[in-house]
Image (cartoon, grey):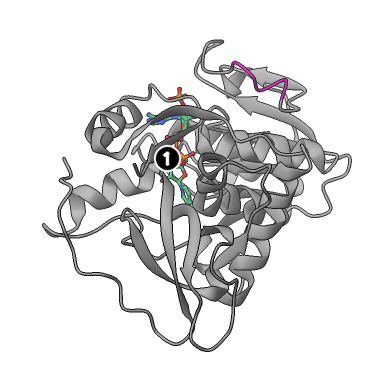
Amino acid sequence: MAVDLVDVPEPEPGPSEAIVEIAAVAINRGELRLLKARPQGWRPGQDVAGVVVVRASDGSGPGPGTRVVAWPEQGGWAQRVALPTSHIAPIGDEVSFSQAATLPIAGMTALRALRLGDPLVGKRVLISGASGGVGRFAVELAAGAGAIVTGVARDAERAAGLRELGATDVTFDPNQLGGPFDLILESTGGHSLEAAVRLVAPGGRVVVFGNSSDTPSQISFADFRGRAGAQIVAFFVYESGEPPTFGDDLRLLADLIADDKLHPSIGLEKSWTEANSVFEALAGRQVNGKAVLIVD
Ligand SMILES: NC(=O)c1ccc[n+]([C@@H]2O[C@H](COP(=O)([O-])OP(=O)(O)OC[C@H]3O[C@@H](n4cnc5c(N)ncnc54)[C@H](OP(=O)(O)O)[C@@H]3O)[C@@H](O)[C@H]2O)c1
């Protein structure tokens, strides 16, 4: 899996699309899979930040010169991109382009998956993959909302910084946990999902949004004994909420950064000319938090 930088035509915006000059893009584990699966010539990129250069012709959205974060469906790894104004949010000067670029997929997934456990005040929340891009956002957002958060990480090195983000407890083996947890964010799959079913509280929720380990899980009805009413909920960020609300939630997250309440963990930042080495690091589980490419 490798990408090349090539010249492509200038974007042609629809009536409700602005053109944004891109300064930084973030990479997601899911995009590594898409890069392998999509045909040659496919242009990835779902997390971007930059400056509006042309306002949407229908007058919606921010005007030229506005610093923004945005969520294209694809094709965001480019110098200029046409973006629907419903998927754009302005960012404060305190928020760097790199920080903003981490928000669309990872920040929104954490935010919207956690909402499935609302209200979070006093709830016990377990987060697998806590050292990852989504996981670190989820730890800080859940703790900020008043939850008692336990993060699952591979080892102490990968867990670095999780307590500072608000985790009360960090474990390297969920089988050692007693539980129960009111809300479990589960994205590691395999034994981690099996453990989640054993750890969920009666009436609690296991929100399943990934399978980073790429391994199946074995669960049966008996695993739910003593957990009547517990639910497993499948979550896909693309199908969460209505598209017009994407920009609203991006703004919410960017404002939390500006208010010093959300701190994106950027584990690796390089020029987009070095994209392939960043993919390797992400695939090799060497990035703590988010990987960002600077469009220079
Ligand atoms: N459903 C949706 O809409 C949606 C949206 C976003 C993401 N996702 C999925 O959610 C998962 C997390 O995304 P992310 O962007 O946070 O990924 P990431 O930054 O790569 O983080 C992955 C996390 O999973 C942990 N992990 C445990 N076992 C693993 C294994 N065998 N292989 C790889 N990672 C393993 C990693 O731990 P280490 O630190 O030890 O490597 C890390 O904490 C991915 O599977 C992604 O595809 C789904």
Task: Examine the residues drawn in magenta and state their main secondary structure.
Answer: loop
Q: Amino acid at mark 1?
A: Ser
Q: Image check: 134 left or right of 76?
A: right
Of residue 104 and residue 59, the one placed in the foreground of this image is: 59
Residue 163 inside the magenta-drawn segment: yes
Q: Image check: 118 left or right of 206?
A: right
Does any atom of ligand 1 lie closer than 8 Å to the CB of label 1? no
Which image quarter is the N terminus in?
top left
Which image quarter is the C terminus in?
top left
**Residue sitting at the far right:** 122
Of residue 62 and residue 208, the one placed in the foreground of this image is: 62
Quarter of the rendered structure image containing ligand 1:
top left
Magenta stretch, residue numbers: 160-164
Q: Is residue 201 visible?
A: no
Dividing the picture into quarters, in which one does residue 262 lie? top right
254 in relation to 181, above or below: below
- Residue 35 in the image: x percent, y percent? 23, 49
Residue at screen point 31% across, 25% down: 284
Residue on which the image places disc 1 = 217
- Residue 269 in the image: x percent, y percent? 42, 30
260 in relation to 227, above or below: above
Q: Is residue 194 visible?
A: yes
